[in-house]
Image (spheres, rainbow, N blue to C red):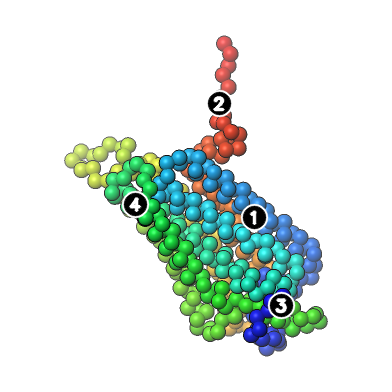
Amino acid sequence: MDIDPHAHLLHLRNFTYFSFFSELHHSDHAAATAVETVAISTVFLVSVAANTGAVALVTWERRLLANKTILTLNLFVADLLFVSMIPLIVAVRWTVSWTLGFTACHTVLYVICMSGSVTITTLASISVERVQAILRMQTAPTLNPRMVTATLIFIWAFSALTALPLSLFFTVVEVDFPEQERLHICTLKWPDSTAEIVWNISFTALCFLLPGLIIVIAKSCRRRLQTRDSPLPVGESPEYHVSRQDMKLFRTLLVLVFSFLLMWSPIFINTFVILARNFLGHLHVSSTVFFWVMTFTLANSALNPILYSVCQFKNGWRKLCCGSAVVPLRRDT
């Protein structure tokens, strides 16, 4: 295994780094890991199937390319990237010691956090794009390649840069575990505790709270817009009109953001608990708890396409699965 040449021997009696996906205290390793494997593998399979189906559904229903269509597809791509690290997590749960190499250690949580940031930032971008389209009175689907390209570059560059410390400071270290042979764990090893605190707060604010706030603000803006199908009050000028489709899209985005905030909150809380653990020696944080919290968060990638499809397309999944719409039976007379 390619071990970092600068990794130091870790003595648990002096200081401990959090082992993340390597559980060093399993009493019944095989049975517990089997349950974990079934659970997270189910998340993986459902997510791949749901996101693939959602991509097919969106491209089927939205035959005319539009800005929001491309951004929606980007949302599903981010979800697929999000769960792509699950096979690595399963492997570590079985081996306990990190045997996947130094490069994989750099990659696993970096990809997870980056794709999560892409997801919430894409949701915010769709909200902003729709508000701009409404204010410009663009009722027909449009495709602005320059705007879409710039938006996608910004989303991925912003997410990659904000999550970069997870790639830089995750490393493989050697653990001198009592009554066992020396093990290797993939852990976060910050050069300075202040930098860790600053990054945790900044990442939470920029990639978690700010995009959610943008979507809420965009939702509140549409309340000032007049629905196209509703009559205008006497004496009031028709300022802006919102189509039923855009109104439904705003509601869908709120549902997705609520789901994201709900399912990502535990992992952010767990991250701050791990941070507090570095300063409070008596605070115990289990790797098993971290695994189940991460599994719950990963399940958001399976829930996103399902919620989007249910909110946006009533009969889309039925058509996709059955090949045709269900026609009511006629009684012969």
Q: Earlier in the sequence, mark 4 or mark 2?
A: 4
- Spatial distance from mark 4 to mark 1, Cα to Cα? 34 Å
The residue indicated by pointer 2 is: 327
For badge 2, the amino acid type reads Val
Q: Name which residue lies at 52% across and 79% down.
A: 196
Local packing at callout 4 (Cα closer than 10 Å; few below 14, some 14-19, many 20+) is many
Residue 39 falls left or right of residue 75 = right
Q: Which residue is mark 4?
A: 131
Instruction: From the viewer's perspective, tell me whether residue 100 is left or right of residue 152.
Output: right
Q: Amino acid at mark 3?
A: His
Residue 169 visible to an observer of this rendering: yes
Q: Which mark is residue 184?
A: 3
Q: Is residue 10 above or below residue 258?
A: below
Which circle marks residue 44 in the picture?
1
Mark 3 is surrounded, within 10 Å at the Cα level, by few (under 14), some (14 to 19) or many (20 or more) other residues, namely many
Q: Quadrant of the C terminus?
A: top right
Q: Earlier in the sequence, mark 1 or mark 3?
A: 1
Q: Position of residue 210 (x, y in %)?
A: 42, 64
